[in-house]
Image: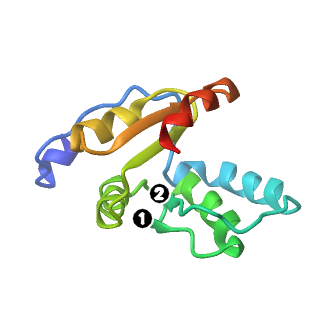
Amino acid sequence: ESAMERDAKKAVMLAVSAPFHCSLMKPAALKLNEALKDVPVSDLKTPVISNADAAPYPSKDEIKNLLVKQVDHPVRWDESMGEVAKRKITAVIEIGPGKVLTGLMRRITKEVKTANLENPGDLEGLSQYK
């Protein structure tokens, strides 16, 4: 009701286990920041688009900051997929449990190949992307 009062076209209750990607996750973001302090980071060989700012990670120096930011900030999905389209990327890989983002991408376009990595064994299936 609140969303509709603010002129939203659609509002859907999501069945989620936690308040991901919002300010309620600030304590988790702080813990992640602490956990990442001593983790070594290398330059990326392939562009990775951050869901926190809808742009490729600019340098290895920003990787940790953007990983922490994505915990308690909104996901910029549409803008991120716009960046994918702008760069004429032909394949995307979802890393983690489930295939929600893979499914969303397929709804946007069938021209981009999608894959999902839920566990290390799934790496074998990526040979088609070489």
How far separated are the C-alphas under marks 2 and 1?
A: 5 Å
Picture coordinates of residue 115, whole percent (x, y): 46, 34
* Left or right of 111 in this view: 119: right
Picture coordinates of residue 14, whole percent (x, y): 35, 31
Q: Amino acid at mark 2?
A: Asn
Q: Tell me the residue that label 2 is attached to.
A: 51
Q: Amino acid at mark 1?
A: Ala
Label 2 environment density (alpha carbons within 10 Å; few <14, some 14–19, many ≥20)? many
Residue extending farthest to the right is 38
Picture coordinates of residue 100, whole percent (x, y): 40, 32
Give the SS element for disc 2: loop
Quadrant, the N terminus? top left
Judge by depth and name the residue closer to the eye, 130 or 95: 130
Q: Are marks 2 and 1 in contact (CB under 8 Å)?
A: yes
* Left or right of 61 in this view: 38: right
Residue drawn at x 40%, y 38% is 114
- Number of numbered labels in the structure image: 2
Q: Against 110, is 81 above or below? A: below
Q: Quadrant of residue 68?
A: bottom right
Q: Against 50, is 91 above or below? A: above
Q: Could you say which disc has been placed on residue 21 in the image?
A: none
Judge by depth and name the residue closer to the eye, 122 or 30: 122
Label 1 environment density (alpha carbons within 10 Å; few <14, some 14–19, many ≥20)? some
Residue drawn at x 54%, y 59% is 48
Residue drawn at x 57%, y 75% is 58
Picture coordinates of residue 95, whole percent (x, y): 56, 39
Q: Could you say which disc has been placed on residue 54 in the image?
A: 1
* Left or right of 106 in this view: 69: right
Give the SS element for disc 1: loop
Q: Against 77, is 127 above or below? A: above
* Left or right of 63 in this view: 102: left
Residue drawn at x 24%, y 39% is 110
